[in-house]
Image (cartoon, helix red, strand yellow):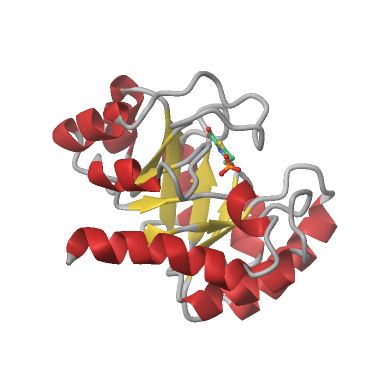
Amino acid sequence: MIGYYFITDKNLSKKGITSDVKEAIRAGVKCVQYRSKDMDSEKAYAEALRLRRLCKDITFLINDRVDIALRADADGVHLGQDDLPVAMARRLLGENKIIGLTVHSIREAKEAKKSGADYIAVSPIYVTKTKRDAGKPRGPALIKKIKKTVKLPVVAIGGINLSNAREVIRAGADGLCAISCVVTKSNVKNEIGKFQQLFKDATD
Ligand code: 3NM
């Protein structure tokens, strides 16, 4: 079980990503992903290094940037379909690092397994404004289909909030990301706690 999976978003964050990550750790998340789409390499590296230190006891992943993951000694990367291919990232990172891949279909999920991804993010589940090019919503049914056919941990992402998270968990997601409905709130730790409770309720 991955549970609530935290992804940084400095544009949406109310208190800044350092504060958000600290609160996510205090909430007990097992995984933090540093996502920074529009920053130069040195700034992104410095920020990644700071967060790596904060996330010393949990899984710390970098979105897209294998180079920054290597420099900051992250635990791995999260890649999109248009990023470096998983096999190439694996060669650069080695067997011990984690590679996650975003998928939008069963075909992509099967490919992810073949290429050696460690987990997949199924996306977008619902309509989201956070990622402009997320594409059309796939609904929780895709999670169910993928869980039946592909033996990889599944994280759900895109438009997830407290009203629809139950159906995502019921569809078999091992974890979920919900960015805007968490980082725009004053108490990030409490908001994360509500999602974690939904996972607990589902397993009790
Ligand atoms: N990736 P929110 S959707 C980072 O579909 C990201 O691949 C997506 O934010 C994808 O929880 C997304 O605010 C943003 O909808 C998710």
Q: Is residue 100 left or right of residue 55?
A: left
How far from the left and from the top, in percent, is residue 37?
Answer: 73, 43
Count of numbered badges drawn on the protein: 0
How far from the left and from the top, in percent, is residue 185?
Answer: 67, 60
**Quadrant showing the C terminus:** bottom left
Q: Residue at x 51, y 47 (%)?
A: 78
Q: Is residue 60 left or right of residue 129?
A: left
Task: Give the vertical position of 168 relative to 131 (above or below).
Answer: below
Q: In this orientation, does residue 2 appear?
A: no
Determine the residue located farthest toward the front in the rendered image: 163
**Quadrant showing the N terminus:** bottom left
Q: Nearer the viewer, residue 138 or 161?
A: 161
Q: Residue at x 72, y 71 (%)?
A: 18
How far from the left and from the top, in percent, is residue 161?
Answer: 50, 46
Q: In this orientation, does residue 103 appear?
A: yes
Q: Residue at x 65, y 67 (%)?
A: 72
Q: Quadrant of residue 33?
A: bottom right
Q: Quadrant of residue 86?
A: top left
Q: Is residue 195 left or right of residue 15?
A: left
Task: Give the vertical position of 168 relative to 105 (above or below).
Answer: below
Q: Where on the image, by quarter, is ligand 1?
A: top right
Q: Nearer the viewer, residue 86 or 92?
A: 86
